[in-house]
Image: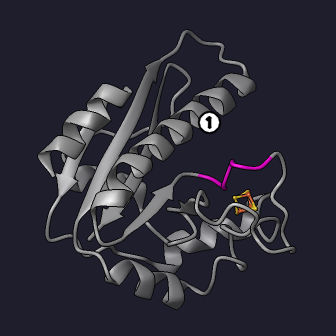
Amino acid sequence: MEKFLSKAFALGFSEVVLLDDLSLDCTEEMRAYCDTCPNHGQNWVCPPNCGTLDECRERASEFNQGILVQSITELTPPTERDVYGRLGREHRLRFRELVEVVEPVVTAVLPLASGGCIFCEQCCFPEPCIKPEMKMESLSAFGVDVTALCEQAGLPFSFREDKVYFTALLLVK
Ligand code: SF4
């Protein structure tokens, strides 16, 4: 697993932490935030199309190890909205690169990132996903408290005008 951590740093992540004995806490309270998001019902990785919380919880429970990564960027306010969008996209493309390194040499992976899936100009929902091998699930849709997860890993987490932390979790078995 150590070589994956080195590779994640080499890809450009600011922080990389291996979480052993992980039991991901998927809560109704966190999932409820999805109800007010404009992406709700618009793609395959947001509720309700990603499956019920119980179904997400069951998928996550098959894994007890994860690689938590962060892309941290210092900004000079005022920060244009599209800067956050660009940084978030770069973070998820970097995460995709990590998945491609890890997936071939382990039994299974479940990539969880912030926000919706970005691998199509527009998600083809409700038609079947056209890139299932690239699809990336959502931490929020799985009811994960990202702040608590980062705390567990000993990492700070916030979303400020002058410093943003994009986070993702690669579940591995
Ligand atoms: S890969 Fe494309 S079609 Fe599939 S969930 Fe992601 S955005 Fe939607």
Q: Quadrant of the C terminus?
A: bottom left
Query: Label 1: how many residues lie within 10 Å, few (<14), some (14-19) or many (20+)?
Result: some
Q: Position of residue 60 (x, y in %)?
A: 39, 77
In the displayed orientation, state which residue is furthest to the front.
104
Q: Position of residue 113 (x, y in %)?
A: 51, 53
Q: Position of residue 159 (x, y in %)?
A: 50, 36
Name the residue type under label 1. Arg
- The stretch in magenta equals 115-120
Dominant SS in magenta: loop
Q: Can you identify the residue that label 1 sits on?
A: 89
Q: Tell me the element at label 1.
A: helix
CB at disc 1 and ligand 1 closer than 8 Å? no
Q: Residue 85, relative to residue 77: is it above or below?
A: below
Quarter of the picture for ligand 1? bottom right
98 left or right, relative to 78: left
Q: Is residue 148 visible?
A: no
Q: Position of residue 92 (x, y in %)?
A: 54, 42
Q: Residue 93, relative to residue 60: is it above or below?
A: above
Q: Nearer the viewer, residue 43 or 75?
A: 43
Q: Is residue 87 visible?
A: yes
